[in-house]
Image: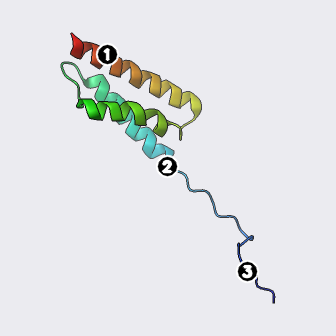
Amino acid sequence: MDEQIGFDLDEPEAPKFVGSHAVRLELHELLETAKAARSESPWDASTLRHHRNSFPIKAKVLPPEEATFLWRQFELELERIETQLAA
């Protein structure tokens, strides 16, 4: 009996990656939306909190330097928006 029972050990399945280009576009879009906000927040409090939490998680598919740079830029914009709203 030459058939193998159980795991297929021939060719490993290629890992499935989230497309970094799609994530990059999404993060840049969020950052641009935040930068464009002048007199009011572009998101309600719940959505803003969601973006603050999910942005760094999504950025992990990018190179570390790029992820850190984008996250810091986004966080600065969120702080600016929150300061503006508190005034």
**Residue position for label 2:** 19
User: Based on the displayed image, in which of its 4 quarters is residue 77 positioned?
Assistant: top left
Of circles 1 and 3, the one toward us is 3
As shown in the figure, which amino acid type bears the numbered disc 1?
Arg
**Which tag, 1 or 3, sits closer to the chain's start?**
3
Secondary structure, mark 2, is: loop
How far is mark 1 from mark 3, CA to CA?
Answer: 60 Å
Query: What residue is at 39 percent from the left and 25 percent from the top?
Result: 74
Mark 2 or mark 1, which is nearer the start of the sequence? Answer: 2
- Name the element at disc 3: loop
Label 2 packing within 10 angstroms: few (<14), some (14-19), many (20+): few
Q: Image height check: is 4 above or below 32? A: below
Q: Which residue is mark 1?
A: 80
Name the image colouring: rainbow
Q: Nearer the viewer, mark 1 or mark 2?
A: 1
Residue at (30% x, 26% y) in the render: 34
Q: Quarter of the image containing the N terminus?
A: bottom right
The amino acid type of the residue labelled 2 equals Gly
All told, the count of numbered labels is: 3
Marks 1/3 in contact by CB < 8 Å: the verdict is no
Question: Distance from label 2 to label 3 (Cα)?
Answer: 34 Å
x, y percent for residue 24: 45, 39
> Badge 3: how crowded within 10 Å, few (<14), some, or many (20+)?
few
Kindly identify which residue carries mark 3: 5
Distance between mark 1 and mark 2 Cα atoms: 30 Å
* Residue 61, percent from left and from top: 53, 41
Mark 3 residue type:
Ile
Crowd tier of the residue under label 1, counting other residues whose Cα lies within 10 Å: few below 14, some 14–19, many 20 or above:
some
Give residue 54's position: percent from left, percent from top: 41, 37
